[in-house]
Image (cartoon, coloured by chain):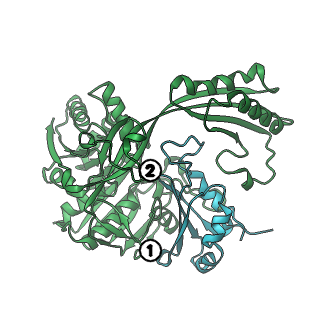
Chain colours: A cyan, B green
Amino acid sequence: MKQKLYDIAHSRAGDKGNTLTLSLIPYDEKDYERLCQVATTERVKAHLNEIVLGEITRYELPNIASLLFVCEQALAGGVTTSFSMDPHGKTLSYALLEMEI
Amino acid sequence: MKQVVRIGCGAGFSGDRLEPAAILVEGGKLDYLVLECLAERTIALAQKRMAADPTKGYDPLLERRMELLLPLLKKHSVRVLTNMGAANPLAAADKVVEIAQRLHLSIKVAVVTGDDVLATITGFEKAMETVKPLSQSGLIISANAYLGADAILPALQSGADIIITGRVADPSLVVAPLVHEFGWSLEDADIIGKATVVGHLMECAGQITGGYFADPLKKPVDGMANLGHPFVDVYRDGRAVISKVEGTGGVINLATAKEQLLYEVTNPYEYITPDVVADFTTITLQQVAANSVAVEGGSGKQKPATLKVSVGYKAGFIGEGEISYAGQQALGRVKLAGAILQQRLQGLFQDLRIDFIGCSSVHPASLGQSCQPYEIRLRVAGKSLSADGAALIGEEVEALYTNGPAGGGGVRKYITDVVGVLSILIDRTKVNCTTIIKEA
């Protein structure tokens, strides 16, 4: 069976206007290097292409062995005026974790 | 002078649970309790309530929270900082004084005002999000600057038991009492950066104790039903240890702390607040005991010359309708219902959103592999300039009962008056803060 990000990492979604933030945190800090290699900006952008319309910036935080993806134009115009079911994009952490590795 | 200050956070949003704050005050040996209750557009909604009734416009749960907490706060000598003043901090203070009198408690309330800058807005200011003049987006109904710790300090120096603010940056509710107790300089960017990290970790209350975290398979958390909220011991050098009251549910560990540290952060090198530009990339976290995580490091650069202002405007109405289908061919029937509504509402709405709840409503269909659930719920949503226009969606969904596919049931329809929020920056010297004292 193919492995998904869900199997080795966890994530929390946050919102700022029309920008979605997704952390990606390995359960085992030893998997941090591997995450850096498999969860590239390009791969995450391709995986979330129906959700994130703008740029994705990846921040590496070796101090806490975690990655942070900042995704622009991802919340249907912004939390306050979007009429999607989940305007904050709170469920989208689990969309990232669906990515196969 | 204190060597360590203990601050609890008993609410992380306007609708947060009431009991965890009471447990913190009773069993947490706190010096301060923070109640953070203002989301991005909470103030604009509160402004609408104040327009309807000038004695309202503060947090809708203020009375219930204060009735529960005031006797406990008094008994345990805990001071409160809260932004529950929302659009009307003065009316909030009057209400707290009234509750204290009713409970025969003597208290001193300090109100921080000055965040409301609506009178200075011309409408020509360009919004950061749209890069167009504010007035082009809709009728402006509120404008509140994010105040910092400097605005809260005079209230702390007044000796007030309860400090009520309107819009302040969430971490500043934690930074201010630390500056007050330790005599730190607000110009010392490194120490204020460290304090801001602590404030950011604490501001969402249950989100660092296992809330918005638990996953039965990979991240099991015990005692979720009585999830405890956190408190933090902060030392003079900025070191901090986050814990919770013994016996409460939930968990504090490196995983919960990391998730919260990165929550809503759009640049970990530059986390901008009215107090500082904090750097999160130099922080270290360490589990020091069960449900106890130490935070060290963190630094900062000089605070920005501008303050962010959230501007609320009327953004029309959202109409929604929902109906369920179940059993054989549920997906086929729900898709037929969607297609029928698309035709019937065509031309009336610029964007019509058709969601299949259970299949593809919060995630795109491509992520759910060959979705074929036993039951599915259709949701249709669209935006209109008028409430009557928005109502058409619910009406057409309801009409599916007798004019749609077989076996549709459980219709719900909603109309929401939408307040949009945009941001601008203003020179901080244009914002004048004052502290007003009220006593019972």
Badge number at residue B286: 1
Mark 1 / mark 2, whichever is N-terminal: 2
Between B397 and B386, the one lying in front of the other is B386
Quarter of the image where one finds residue B366: bottom right
Residue B292 in the figure: left or right of residue B214: left
Percent from the top left, x then y, of residue A71?
A: 54, 61
Residue B311 in the figure: left or right of residue B333: left
Residue that mark 2 sits on: B130
B401 up-or-down from A66: above or below: above
Check the residue under mark 1 and report the chain it is in. B
In the image, farthest residue toward the top:
B402
Percent from the top left, x then y, of residue B217?
A: 67, 59
Q: Circle 2: is it few (<14), some (14-19), or many (20+) Cα within 10 Å?
A: few
The secondary element bearing badge 2 is classed as loop
Question: Which residue is drawn at the image coordinates 46% and 58% (left, top)?
Answer: B264
The N terminus of chain B, quarter of image: bottom left
The secondary element bearing badge 1 is classed as strand
Quarter of the image where one finds residue B56: top left
Mark 1 or 2: the one toward you: 2
Percent from the top left, x then y, of residue B130?
A: 44, 50
Kind of residue indicated by mark 2? Thr
Decide if residue B350 is in sight here. yes
Question: Which residue is drawn at the image coordinates 40% and 54% (left, top)?
Answer: B128
The C terminus of chain B, quarter of image: top left
Kind of residue indicated by mark 1? Gln
Percent from the top left, x then y, of residue B248?
A: 46, 53
Between B4 and A95, the one lying in front of the other is A95
- Alpha-carbon span between mark 1 and mark 2: 42 Å
Decide if residue B40 is in sight here. no
Check the residue under mark 2 and report the chain it is in. B
A87 up-or-down from B391: above or below: below
Question: Which residue is drawn at the image coordinates 19% and 60% (left, top)?
Answer: B180
